[in-house]
Each structure stands twice: as structure tokens, then as C-alpha cells.
Image (cartoon, rainbow, N blue to C red):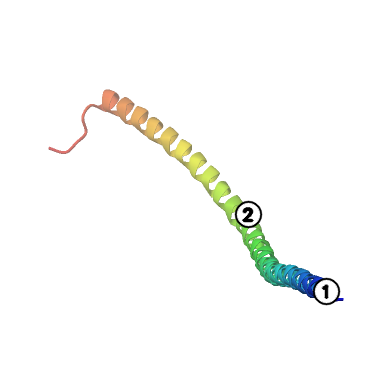
Amino acid sequence: MEKEKPLAHALNDLFTSVSSLVQGELQGTNNLLDLIEKMNLRTADEYNSFGDIASGLRVYVEQLKMKNESFHEYIKQIDEIDQQVTELEDVVSMLDKYTYTLETKVRSTCGDLRPR
């Protein structure tokens, strides 16, 4: 019986040590799982804020689109005015040439009529 007592004591110490080891491993695993859970919650919060930002940007883009569409009418008017100015410049150029030609003809026919 005396031989069994140290063996029982050694086995008891072995089981206690193995139990402590397993308990430590499980505690480490629990700690890692807690950390992963916190990281997941933080990531979910971050993505939620990204969703809010994206939603705000969508509204902003829609507003810009509406403003851009309202400018199309002004751009069309500016293009029409530009076309009219170009046509007017052509008419003025033609009139200038005609006036110069007429002035040249009058001078050649009547001479210099400027007062002295």
C-alpha cells in the first residue's frame, strides 16, 4: 500500500497539472474569442458609419445632378447668344468692308472732301 501512495500522489499531481494546462488553454481560447468578438463589433460599427457616409454622398450627388441639369438651360442660352454674337460680328465685318469700299469709291469720285 505504501508504494501506491506516492504513485497516487504523483498521478493526482499529474491530473492537477493537466487540468491546469487545459484550463489555461481554454482561458486563452476564450480571451481570443472575446478579442475577435470586440474586433467584429468595432468593424461592424465602422461599416455602419461607411453606410451613413455613402448615403450622404448619394444625396449630395443627386443634388449636384439637379444643379447640373438646371445649368443646361443657361448653357443653351449662352450658346445661342454666342451664335448670335458670331453672326453679328460677321454682319459688322461685312458692313465695315462695305463702308470702306464705299468710302474709297466716294473719295476716288469726289476727291478728298475733308474740310481744311
Structural crowding at the residue carrying mark 2, measured as other residues with C-alpha within 10 Å and reported as few (<14), some (14–19) or many (≥20): few
Mark in front: 2 vs 1: 1
Residue 8 is marked as 1
Q: Amino acid at mark 1?
A: Ala
Which residue appears at 81% of the width and 70% of the height?
7
Q: Kindly indicate the quadrant of the structure image that contains residue 102.
A: top left
Left or right: where does residue 35 sit relative to residue 101? Answer: right
The residue identified by callout 2 is 72
Q: Is 101 located above or below residue 13 in the figure?
A: above
Element type at mark 2: helix
Residue 12 pos. (x, y %): 80, 74
Q: Judge by depth and name the residue closer to the eye, 12 or 52.
A: 12
Q: Amino acid at mark 2?
A: His
Query: From mark 2 to mark 1, how far is it between C-alphas?
Result: 94 Å
Residue 21 pos. (x, y %): 74, 69
Residue 101 pos. (x, y %): 36, 27
Element type at mark 1: helix
Q: Judge by depth and name the residue closer to the eye, 68 or 115.
A: 68
Q: Are marks 2 and 1 in contact (CB under 8 Å)?
A: no
Structural crowding at the residue carrying mark 1, measured as other residues with C-alpha within 10 Å and reported as few (<14), some (14–19) or many (≥20): few
Q: Judge by depth and name the residue closer to the eye, 83 or 7.
A: 7
Which residue appears at 54% of the width and 43% of the height?
83
